[in-house]
Amino acid sequence: MTTRRQFGLAAASLLAVPTLLKAQGNNKIILGQSAAFTGPAAELGIQFHQGARIWFDQVNAQGGVAGKTIEIKTLDDGYEPDRCAANTQKLISEDVFALFGYIGTPTSLAALPLLSKAQVPFIAPFTGAMGLREPFNKQVFHLRASYNDETALIVRQLTNLGLKKIAVFYQNDAYGKAGLDGVTLALDKLGLKPVAQATVERNSVDVAAAVRTLNAAGPDAVVQISAYKSCAAYIRAARKAGFGGTFFNVSFVGTQALADELGKDGAGVVVSQVMPSPYSLARPITREFSEAVKKAGGNAQANFSSMEGYLAAKVVTEGLKRAGTRMNSREGLIQGIEAIGSQSLGGFQLNFSASQHVASSFVELSMLTGDGRVRT
């Protein structure tokens, strides 16, 4: 697991780039990323950023796109909306070309009105919330499937197994409520409702009240909509209190971070995934990514979050290439990404157009093995 100190050292040279003066340099494209690089959700930001850097470093080593290198200016928001809003205002004021790889629903929602007003592209936020997808926003491009897609698969899997007493443990913010809405919608279609629901505050591991509430309902399974620290704390506490059912998580939990946090206690925990498995070499994109991680060396790690960063960076690069002579304008980048159309990235299908800014509805399930590995 990458430590925050290691990330800080790795990013030091990046953050040493001189402050922008209201314009991109002639030979570089600057993307702005506000994400959690410290705090209980830090691994999500660190891992996504690592994956993106692996791809951009490869592109830059080959001369960039039309002679322009691509760099990411990072600001830490600790997974807090107010800090993210301030970071976004700062990045916009410094005239970054696009915003990229924000981590989380509440933070992305805080940034949305600012980037919409400034008409700055917002690419590949690490969230599946419908509030960022509807209504359609020309500036926003999603790489991943929605939480509705993920929770629909989870509910289908559970009910197909005959497990219909489903409880929801969710983060008390826009992210948790988006996941709760997805579970409730999926259950409603089957004439069911959650047997119980309980919350945890963002960036907190105070789960005692949630454990009491949900265990009292005797659910067959608990669907968790939170980040890895709180989900791990809940799993341990619920089991200690006598819960013998199963745990399902959506992808935002951070699969490798959750596995690292739980260790042997992770055995049997299920996580829905919206990216190709970085562990199965069946797809060409996984083989490409695995080789890129090996070449990058250092602290680089192949996991679902870094895979998402890698693929998101490829989308940006492809959009710039397709923008052609208009790649120096934000509108050109938007049109370039839309022009990607229907395309496979080594077995991961993308579908972009002028009216379709959600690239994928791909979802599959994975399971933690208890020894730090993930089985898909």
Image (cartoon, helix red, strand yellow):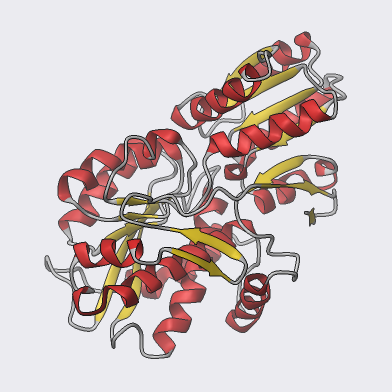
Q: Quadrant of residue 253?
A: top right
With 11 as the anchor, is 180 left or right in this view? right
**Position of 244 compared to 321: left or right?**
right
Q: Residue furthest bottom?
A: 62
Q: Nearer the viewer, residue 277 or 344?
A: 344
Q: Position of residue 327 (x, y in %)?
A: 23, 74
Q: Is residue 78 above or below residue 185?
A: below
Question: Can residue 207 be seen at all in this image of the molecule?
Answer: no
Rendered image quadrant of residue 91: bottom left
* In the displayed structure image, the side of residue 160 where residue 42 appears, left or right: left
Residue found 73% across the figure and 25% down from its top: 222
Q: Residue at left 23%, top 39%?
A: 113
Residue 345, located in which quarter of the rendered image? bottom right
Q: Nearest the camera: 210 or 156?
A: 156
Q: Is residue 103 visible?
A: yes
Residue at the image point whose x is 55% and y is 34% from the top = 148
Instruction: Please determine whether, in this image, residue 25 is positioned above or below residue 208.
Output: below
- Residue extending furthest toward the top: 216
Quarter that holds the C terminus: bottom right
Identified at 69% across, 60% down, the residue is 277
Instruction: Check the image and report above or below for 205 versus 146.
Output: above
* x then y, percent, for residue 20: 18, 69
How many numbered badges does the structure rendering display? 0
The image quadrant where one finds the N terminus is bottom right
Picture coordinates of residue 13 (x, y %)?
A: 38, 75
Residue 142 position in % (x across, y down):
43, 51
Vertical position of residue 314 compared to residue 86: above or below? below
